[in-house]
Image (tube, helix red, strand yellow):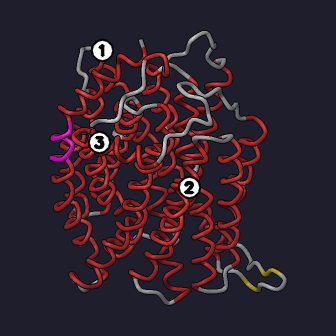
Amino acid sequence: MPTPSPTPSATTTGTQPWPSPRQVWGGVALFGGTVFVLFANNTIVGLLLQMIKKDFGLSDTGVSWIVGFAGVLFGAAAALPVARLVDRTNRKIIIGIGLLIVSLGTVMCGVARGFWGLLIGRLIGGVGGSGNGPAAYSILADYMPPQKLPRALAMMNLGFALSRPAAMIFGGGLIVLAVTTPEVTLPAIGTLHPWQVVFLYLAIPEIALGVLALALLHEPRRRGAPSADVIPLADVFRYLWDHRRAFGPMFGGLALNSLAFGTAVWEAAFFQRTYGWSPAQYGVIEGSVLFVLAPIGMLAGGFAAEWLGRRGYDDANLRVVFYGMLLHLPFAILYPLMPTPLWAIALSAINTSISGGLGAPQNAALQVILPSRMRGIITALYLLVFTLVGFGLAPTVVALITDHVIGDESQIRYSLVVLQVVVGPLAAFIFYLGMKPYGEEFARAKSWYR
């Protein structure tokens, strides 16, 4: 028997006012800045991949474990317990302390003396970041009425859209600065590699954001249920199972889409091995193009979903995701095969901009059909799929294809193509299967907010 949905009285605002616009948009700006920094730093680590591999004498598979799977595994282990705290304790403390823990892990990477020191730093960073997404989405859902949530998510996700191009531009500059400045030697640690100096720079904004979150972020009143009234995990999973026709394609499509997205960590290595471009050269050129195109794609995805919704499409959010998948796939498959780096840059930027624009409607699709008292834990599960597959498994899958199928690291372009050809169309098909049941769930959920 399906778990009963929350009644309208459990999810409407009652007589309690919503937070002020200053509190709401200040929070959205801080969340956007946090998303920007965390994802930008991860992109910069991708630019450092070749340097880390060389200095520590690692294979593609070995370095992929450090830059990808290590932090994600520990983050995955911490995600569910932290998400339960999101549903019952002060969320701004979870965000602020988590960012400070992330910065500690980044600093440890900057002073690591070998493989294991770097691995531990990445593990600590993964734990620190595990609660950021669930807490931020939970707060946003209590900041404003449901009909305004997609636009707020699109604005927040501008941080994600800008993170990669900004990281490529400024990350390339950081690498040049670290390589060309005198060696840095620390007491009891010794001389640092240039890429380790970059890690120390990356910790600065993480510390600043953690302090800002603790000092300035507004913790809103929880809407829908008392903070102590937390639904047991067994009931949460039963709810997902009872509504599997809608949630199954959303989680399955996300997993496959994340597997394809994870190829981004190897793009700097692809341009270096295929066209002879340095990570700094690739970062500045690709980043400059994406700095213009990525925000356009992000906003277009959010406004397209809103436009379809106003025209009566209950499946508007997932419909945009499906059409966007069809649109970006040709660019994703073709860019690694281009004969010149400029053609590859152009097609790669278009691919990234279109696929990045699917984030806002995809996340909004989940939030608007979730019962309020399950929002934190289910959002954590959803983000766990994205991080575990996209940032953990996918870099290693590319490395395994390169090392054991292609057998030649200079031909990494074919690893990128194989992964996109296999998982991209399958992800689009799964999203298509989920459109109708998702629309039915959304139509039912609309009654909660009347």
Of residue 68 and residue 59, the one placed in the foreground of this image is: 68
Check disc 1: other Cα within 10 Å, few if <14, some if 14-19, many if 20+: few
Residue 218 appears at what percent x and percent y?
A: 70, 31
Q: Is residue 432 magenta?
A: yes
Give the distance between the C-alpha atoms of the residues marked 3 and 1, in whole angstroms: 23 Å
The C terminus appears in which quarter of the rendering?
Answer: top left
Residue positioned 36% across, 73% down in the render:
396
Q: Is residue 3 magenta?
A: no
The reply to whether the C-beta atoms of the residues labelled 2 and 3 are less than 8 Å apart is no
Give the distance between the C-alpha atoms of the residues marked 1 and 2, in whole angstroms: 38 Å
| Residue bearing the label numbered 2 | 81
Check disc 3: other Cα within 10 Å, few if <14, some if 14-19, many if 20+: many
The reply to whether the C-beta atoms of the residues labelled 1 and 2 are less than 8 Å apart is no
The N terminus appears in which quarter of the rendering?
Answer: top left
Q: What kind of residue is marked 2? A: Pro
Relative to 124, does residue 192 appear above or below in the rendering? below
Q: Tag 2's secondary structure?
A: helix
| Residue bearing the label numbered 3 | 247
Residue 405 appears at what percent x and percent y?
A: 21, 82
The answer to whether residue 289 shows anywhere in this view is yes
Q: What kind of residue is marked 3? A: Phe
Residue positioned 66% across, 70% down in the render:
178
Q: Which residues are magenta?
A: 428-434
| Residue bearing the label numbered 1 | 310
Give the distance between the C-alpha atoms of the residues marked 2 and 3, in whole angstroms: 22 Å
Query: Which mark is first along the chain, 3 or 2?
Result: 2
